[in-house]
Amino acid sequence: MDLSRTRLPVSLRRIVAPLLLAAAASGAPAQQDADRFPAAAMSFLGGELPAMEAAITARDRDYFEDAMGRMLDFSDSWGFKTRDNPALARFPMCTDAVSDFLVVGMCRIMTTNSACEPGMAAKFNSNLQKCRELAATR
């Protein structure tokens, strides 16, 4: 077992932010129909959230490393968190839910981490619900 993989960063934001920036700088993603983004975000989260719950129960921190890659691939495919697809700006509840789910999950394992702000989980749940409702109307 590689012990370096089981160590968690001091601040989750120090890990998430550079990875999102790296994904944004990696090249222009293919443009997709922004109207489909809420449904795509819910499909992505629908697959990830049950797996994350299982990882939290098992205290499996390796899940989060792999999930970060999947989240970056998803965000890159939509031009998410870049200026490449400004049409997604009208769906902040969905973009926030996608970008925050891993941090919220990690905070359930590492409750004392400084990146775990009070109210973060409630904000995520609210954004998730709003995105789910929006996806159902499209």
Image: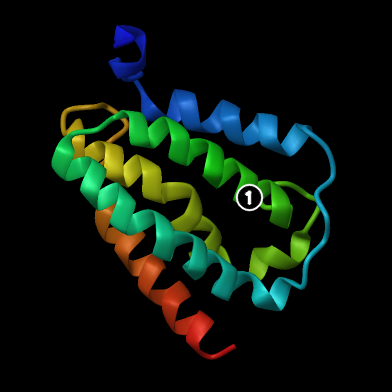
Q: Position of residue 103 (x, y in %)?
A: 36, 40
Q: Nearer the viewer, residue 65 or 114?
A: 65
In what quadrant of the picture does the C terminus appear?
A: bottom right
Left or right: residue 120 compared with residue 96? left
Q: Circle 1 sits in a helix, a strand or a loop, which is it?
A: helix
Quick check: 96 left or right of 64?
right
Q: Is residue 119 visible?
A: no
| Residue positioned 69% across, 78% down in the render | 35
Q: Residue furthest top?
A: 3
Callout 1, which amino acid?
Ser
Q: Position of residue 51 (x, y in %)?
A: 32, 51
- Could you tell me if residue 79 is visible in this image? yes
Instruction: Report the residue marked by disc 1.
Output: 75
Q: Residues within 10 Å of mark 1 (few under 14, many from 20)?
A: many
Residue located at (78% from left, 33% from top): 26
Which of the colour schemes (rainbow, by chain, secondary structure, one colour) is used? rainbow
